[in-house]
Image: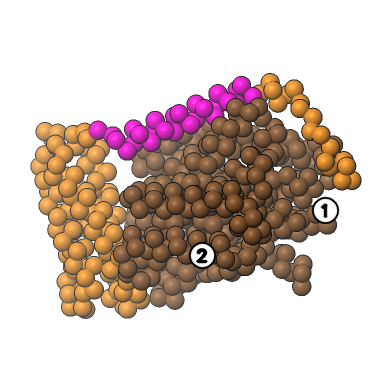
Chain colours: A brown, B orange
Amino acid sequence: MKKLLEISLGLIAALGGFIDIGDLVFATQAGAKFGLRLLWAVALGTFLIIVYSEMSGRVAAITKKPSFQLIKEAFPKKLAITALGASTVVNLMTFAAEIGGVALILQLLSGLPYRALIVAAALAFLLIIWLVSFGAIEKIFGYGGLGLLVMAVAAVKMKPDWHVAANGLVPHLGAPAGNWTYWYFAVGIIAATLMPYEVYFYSSGAIEEKWKASDLVTNKINSIVGFILGGALVAAIISLSASVFYGPQIEPSAINTAALAPLVPLGKAGLLAALAGMLFSIGGAAIETCFSGAYNIAQYTGWRWGKNVDPLKVPKFTVTWLVMLAAATAIVLAGFDPITITEYAVIFSVVLMPLTYFAIIRTAKDKAQMGLHVNKPWNTTLAWIAYAFVCAVSVAAVPLMIITQRGSG
Amino acid sequence: MLEVTMAAIPHPTRVLRYRNWLLIIAAAALAVTLVAAWVVTTHPVANIDDAKLDSYRKSLLSNTREAEMLAYQMQHGRATGHYADISAQNLYASTSDTAAKLQTETPEHNTAQQVRAVADTANNLSAALADLSQSPDQPRLQQIIGRLHMAEQELQPS
């Protein structure tokens, strides 16, 4: 039973960590613009996140060091502070986008004013983070997020061309590869899958849950099965979007359009399940980014931290996430569009990837710290291959964003 | 085991070799991202040339087809009321924004007539979407669908 619960953590991490507003935005737009031609980007992103989440979970379980502590140890002070500043900005942007996304979905469900729902969502997050235990948060949002499985049901019901889907698992070097927008969305999908906050949260969560060497099997199952499930769901969203929007050349630019996709084949039940799934997935991701922001700052500064500790006993950590919540709420209340913030946050986050993932590899292959659980040679080879992709994405992301004017070119 | 895992961390010189490059790359990417964000959000208003007009037309056509899809779902009682109203409001906001640009931006000489035609269609489309966001009854909905079809035909590339 305990093992089963631990494995469910994998599902939760897959949905809460994988499907966030960034995945929804990029996957829906990619399917509408390019049909099934970008499925390979989901497969590549899934491979990369599996490699790094497995390593970060293993490192956290053995060394008891979360990702940001590794960054602090791996780099000189100036570079580590730069990484901290950049990660805080990205976490804040992502958190703001997720709060806005939750408010938009609540508006679609209730018809109430958007700004009032932003405030209501922020208050709900405050109460949930303060009062609900770490384990309960994971279960509530993880299981609620399973509503998004309706996207997979709808995708299958639309009878996708499996031959074309298989073709989409290979990058197209011919047309439309000459189209910069195609590569922008490829990078966006990979970046959204690989958002560094997911690794920060995953490794910090492993420490919160007091993982040890005996938990490494669970870590492996969580990373491989959980994230493959998450990747399959992103692929289903692309496939569904391709079936519904690609033919009539509809360009989805809002969350309600993403929900229109399951509505077409499944009617009202599909719409409501999708909206509920989005609400919990984006809500779960919002809490993860809030914690990631506070974790990073606390881990860098050496403050006591932890969701499983009484908030009043870790006052600096508590104030940090409260400030994150207030600042993110203020950003969306100021009128910034959550979808636009998401696109910037996803692309901006790639800047952090090389720093974050280098620190993880460095520790995972260090026998002095990892002992018997040090990387095997094939682990390290795989990690460096993955690192080459991460660096390529990191270098390409910002120029592509400029050239394509955020994918509209 | 514990002693091994908690051992002092060596400071590999290899890392130091990469640090300046990583610092430069991170700082450059940060700066480029911020500048790009500024450029994209404050892009100066340009004249409407053929490419820009085509981009507006495509955006309007996308909104029209999405509205038709939504209206069809409403006609068959498949969408919830709040979802339909808010979706139509979003489409209205996006369409009227494009309509406003078509009226305020200056068309280049060779596009003036086409810009006027697309602007008229955009205005008609905005009105239809405003009606769609008011929970219309079935006869009214049928009429709105007719107006959407007309807008779609007008926006088709010639």
In the rendered image, the vertical position of residue B42 relative to residue A342, given as above or below = above
Q: Quadrant of residue A123?
A: bottom left
Task: Report if residue B36 lies within the magenta region.
Answer: yes
Judge from the rendering whether residue B23 lies leftward or rightward of residue B52; answer left or right: right
Quadrant where the C terminus of chain A lies?
Answer: top left
> Is label 1 on the same chain as label 2?
yes
Image height of B156 relative to A72, above or below: below
- Which residue is pictured at 73% across the width and 40% down the height? A382
Q: Residue at x 87, y 41 (%)?
A: B4
Relative image position of residue A158 (x, y in whole percent): 47, 67
Q: Which residues are magenta?
A: B19-44
Q: Which residue is mark 2?
A: A127
Labels 1 and 2: the sequence-earlier one: 2
Kind of residue at disc 2: Leu
Mark 1 lies on residue = A213
**Residue A253 image offset from top left, x and y in percent:** 36, 53
